[in-house]
Structures are given as structure tokens and as C-alpha cells.
Image: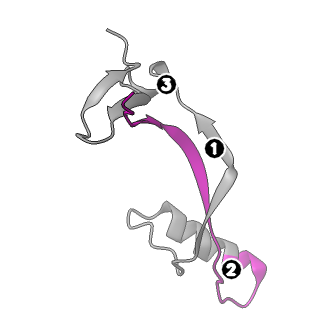
Amino acid sequence: MKEFDFYLDHKHTIWYRNKFTIEAETLEEAKAKVLQICDSDTDELPSEDWDLLHDTAEYLTPDENGGEATQELYENNSGDIIWTNKKQ
């Protein structure tokens, strides 16, 4: 009997954490500086130190994903999608 390989992708939301240091004279000044960074359009933090918080992963439904699929089943060799959970 032959064997056929497949894979199923699931879409989730997950949080990342960025650790960084702000130099300032006081905690209040540091808070003001970091809030300015977070409120800016550039969103450039002073560190590239991102940690993936694995325990925060949550499955998305198609309704929570704008009606788009959150599960896609593929045939492994061709990479063709053969099924999704997108609502018709």
C-alpha cells in the first residue's frame, strides 16, 4: 500500500515580548520616553530582543479572521491546498 503525506496549517494569535532599557533621570521620565516610542508611527523600540510567548497562543476561527480560513490542508509533495475551513 502507498503512503501519502499531508500537512495542516492552523492560524493563531500569539504575543511577543520585547525587553529593553530606557535611560532617564527618573522613572517618570523613562515612562514618558517609552510611551512616546510606543505612540509613534515608527514603533522602533531600542532593542531587537523579541521573545515568543508560547503559552499565549490562541486559535482563531474564520469569523475572527474576517471570514478567511484559519486551517489549510495541503498535499505535501505538490504543496497544493486541498481543503480549508473558510466559510462559503
- Relative to the observer, which residue lies in front, 64 or 81? 81
Q: Quadrant of residue 17?
A: bottom right
Q: Is residue 20 left or right of residue 77?
A: right
Residue 61 at x, y percent in the picture = 51, 23
Is 14 colored magenta in this rendering?
A: yes
**20 to 67, vertically: above or below:** below
Q: Residue furthest front?
A: 1
Q: Is the N terminus in the top left, top right, bottom left or bottom right quadrant?
A: top left
SS at badge 1: strand
Residue where numbered disc 3 is placed: 64
Q: Residues within 10 Å of mark 1 (few under 14, many from 20)?
A: few
Q: Are marks 2 and 3 in contact (CB under 8 Å)?
A: no
**25 to 47, vertically: above or below:** below
Q: CA distance from mark 1 to mark 2?
A: 34 Å
Is 26 colored magenta in this rendering?
A: yes
Over which residues does the magenta segment extend? 1-30
The amino acid sitting under disc 1 is Ala
Residue at 38% across / 62% down in the picture?
41
Give the mark, 2 or 3, whose residue is nearer the N terminus: 2
The amino acid sitting under disc 3 is Glu
Mark in the foreground, 2 or 3: 3
- Relative to the observer, which residue lies in front, 46 or 41? 46
Mark in the foreground, 1 or 2: 1
Residue where numbered disc 2 is placed: 29
Residue at 53% across / 81% down in the picture?
46
Q: CA distance from mark 3 to mark 1?
A: 14 Å
Q: Is the C terminus in the top left, top right, bottom left or bottom right quadrant?
A: top left
Residue where numbered disc 1 is placed: 57
SS at badge 2: helix
Residue at 29% across / 24% down in the picture?
82
**39 to 45, vertically: above or below:** above
